[in-house]
Image: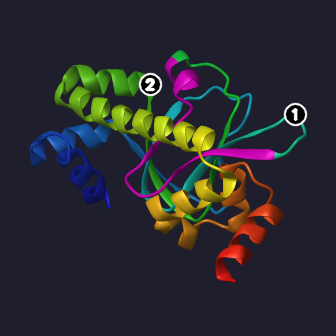
């Protein structure tokens, strides 16, 4: 399963088999049950997660006590609360497994040691963060420039894998809809 991680690193930089053997020692692996929380609001954010298998989501509770999903991570995607992770601070988010998952995780201290010992990993993480930032920018653009219906259909077009794997109520949460409104949009498309 760690081959998934090695292949992902290889998309951005080169590491030898010997280097990878050493790199993986900075990480731990964990199996996570469906609906199990890896992080809860108020906890210190200690880990950065890489999804080997499964699906995670990040969400917060709004002022009405409703879950608002801000992000998903499928295989080969990273997830953490970046601000809290960097500051070793309490988080305002939850990270939860949407399906049974297997993750690699690293502490901030180990990540710093990893980057110092293997500078090539700086390049890897730079590309990871650039892609995450670009995805956040695109989501903001779609949220601010498209109607809710158009945003939903754009999301389906860009990420069809989510439609198959993510429960509709979570897609609604991510898009800022109620599940009922998403159901109406889907019915219109079918008719």
Q: Position of residue 87 (x, y in %)?
A: 54, 16
Whether residue 190 is visible to the viewer of this picture, yes or no, is yes
- Image vertical order of residue 150 relative to residue 107, above or below: below
> Which quadrant is the C terminus positioned in?
bottom right
What is the span of residues highlighted in magenta in the rendered image? 67-86
Kindly identify the residue that appears in the image at 23 percent across and 51 percent down: 6
Q: Which residue is mark 2?
A: 108
Kindly identify the residue that appears in the image at 74 percent across and 62 percent down: 169
On screen, residue 62 versus residue 46, left or right, reads: right
Q: Position of residue 31 (x, y in %)?
A: 52, 58
Q: Nearer the viewer, residue 80 or 132?
A: 132
In space, the residues marked 1 and 2 are separated at their CA atoms by: 30 Å
Whether residue 36 is visible to the viewer of this picture, yes or no, is no
Q: Nearer the viewer, residue 181 or 101?
A: 181
Q: Which residue is mark 1?
A: 63
To which quarter of the image does residue 122 belong?
A: top left
Q: Nearer the viewer, residue 76 or 70?
A: 70
Camera-near label (1 vs 2) is: 1
Q: Secondary structure at mark 1?
A: loop
Kindly identify the residue that appears in the image at 56 percent across and 19 percent down: 88
On screen, residue 172 versus residue 150, left or right, reads: right
Q: Secondary structure at mark 2?
A: helix
């Amino acid at each position: 399963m760690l081959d998934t991680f090695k292949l992902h690193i290889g998309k951005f930089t080169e590491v030898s088999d010997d280097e990878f053997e050493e790199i993986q020692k900075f990480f731990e692996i964990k199996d996570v049950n469906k609906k199990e929380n890896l992080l809860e609001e108020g906890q210190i954010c200690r880990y950065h997660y890489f999804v080997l298998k499964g699906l995670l989501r990040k969400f917060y509770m709004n002022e009405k006590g409703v879950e608002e999903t801000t992000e998903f991570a499928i295989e080969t995607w990273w997830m953490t609360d970046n601000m809290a992770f960097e500051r070793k601070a309490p988080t305002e988010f939850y990270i939860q497994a949407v399906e049974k998952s297997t993750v690699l995780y690293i502490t901030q201290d180990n990540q710093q040691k990893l980057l110092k010992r293997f500078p090539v990993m700086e390049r890897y993480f730079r590309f990871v963060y650039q892609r995450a930032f670009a995805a956040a920018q695109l989501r903001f653009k779609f949220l601010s420039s498209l109607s809710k219906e158009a945003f939903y259909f754009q999301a389906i077009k860009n990420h069809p894998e989510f439609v198959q794997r993510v429960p509709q109520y979570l897609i609604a949460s991510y898009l800022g809809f109620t599940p009922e409104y998403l159901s109406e949009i889907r019915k219109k498309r079918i008719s």
